[in-house]
C-alpha cells in the first residue's frame, strides 16, 4: 500500500511546537500493520524534528540554544531583505532538517515513550506550513 497527501499545519509563532497529534489525525495509520511514514516539510525556514514530547522545557532550551548559536543581525549575513529572522531561519532549518522517516507498527507510529514530532518554526510570522506525508506498508 502507498498513500500520500499534503497536510497543512496551522500558522504558529516562532518556537518549537509539538504537532504529533495534529499530524496523526490526518494519517490513515490504522490501515498499516508494518510500514514506514516519511514526512517532508516544504519550507526552507522551518524544520521537523523528533524529540521530547513531555517536558516543554526541552523545546524552550533547544530554541534558546539555536537562537544563541545562530543570532539575528549577524554582520556577516548578506541575505537580509526578508527581515532579520530569515537567514537565521534558513540556517536552523538546514541544521535540523526537512524530513523524518518513522516506523509504523500495528496501525501506530513505533515511537519511544517520550518522543514526539516537532514543528520547528524559525520565523516570527512563518504562516501555515505544508508537510508531505508518504505512507508505505502492508
Image: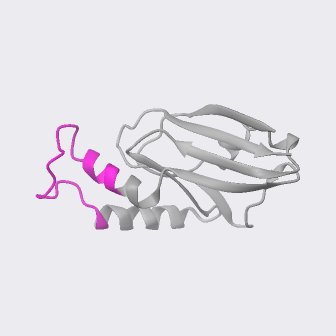
Q: Return the residue found at the far left.
A: 75
Protein image colouring: one colour
**Quarter location, residue 73:** bottom left
Image position of 11 (left or right of 74): right
Residue at (74, 67) in percent of width and height: 113
Check the picture and name the quadrant holding the C terminus. top right
From the viewer's perspective, tell me whether residue 119 is left or right of residue 28.
left
* Residue 90 in picture, x, y percent from top left: 33, 50
- Is 116 included in the stretch rendered in magenta? no
Percent position (x, y) of residue 50? 59, 60
Say whether residue 95 is left or right of residue 98. left
The foreground one among 22 and 96 is: 96
Where residue 96 appears, x then y in whole percent? 45, 59
Image position, residue 46 (x, y; %): 43, 47
Q: Main secondary structure of the magenta part?
A: loop
Dividing the picture into quarters, in which one does residue 92 lie? Answer: bottom left
Residue at horizontal 45%, vertical 67%? 61
As drawn, 107 above or below 12: below
Front in this rendered view, residue 71 or 57: 71
Specify the segment rendered in magenta: 69-91
- Quadrant where the N terminus sits is top right
Q: Residue at x 51, y 61 (%)?
A: 59
Amino acid at each position: 500500500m502507498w498513500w500520500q497527501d499534503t497536510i497543512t499545519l496551522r500558522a504558529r509563532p516562532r518556537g518549537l511546537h509539538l504537532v504529533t497529534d495534529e499530524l496523526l489525525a490526518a494519517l490513515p495509520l490504522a490501515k498499516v500493520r508494518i510500514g514506514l511514514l516519511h514526512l517532508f516539510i516544504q519550507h526552507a525556514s522551518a524544520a521537523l524534528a523528533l524529540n521530547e514530547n513531555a517536558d516543554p522545557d526541552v523545546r524552550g532550551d533547544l530554541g534558546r540554544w539555536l537562537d544563541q548559536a545562530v543570532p539575528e543581525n549577524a554582520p556577516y549575513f548578506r541575505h537580509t531583505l526578508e527581515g532579520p529572522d530569515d537567514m537565521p531561519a534558513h540556517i536552523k532549518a538546514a541544521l535540523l532538517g526537512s524530513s523524518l522517516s518513522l516506523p509504523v507498527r500495528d496501525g501506530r507510529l513505533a515511537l519511544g515513550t517520550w518522543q514526539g514530532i516537532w514543528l520547528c518554526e524559525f520565523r516570527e510570522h512563518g504562516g501555515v506550513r505544508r508537510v508531505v506525508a508518504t505512507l508505505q506498508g502492508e
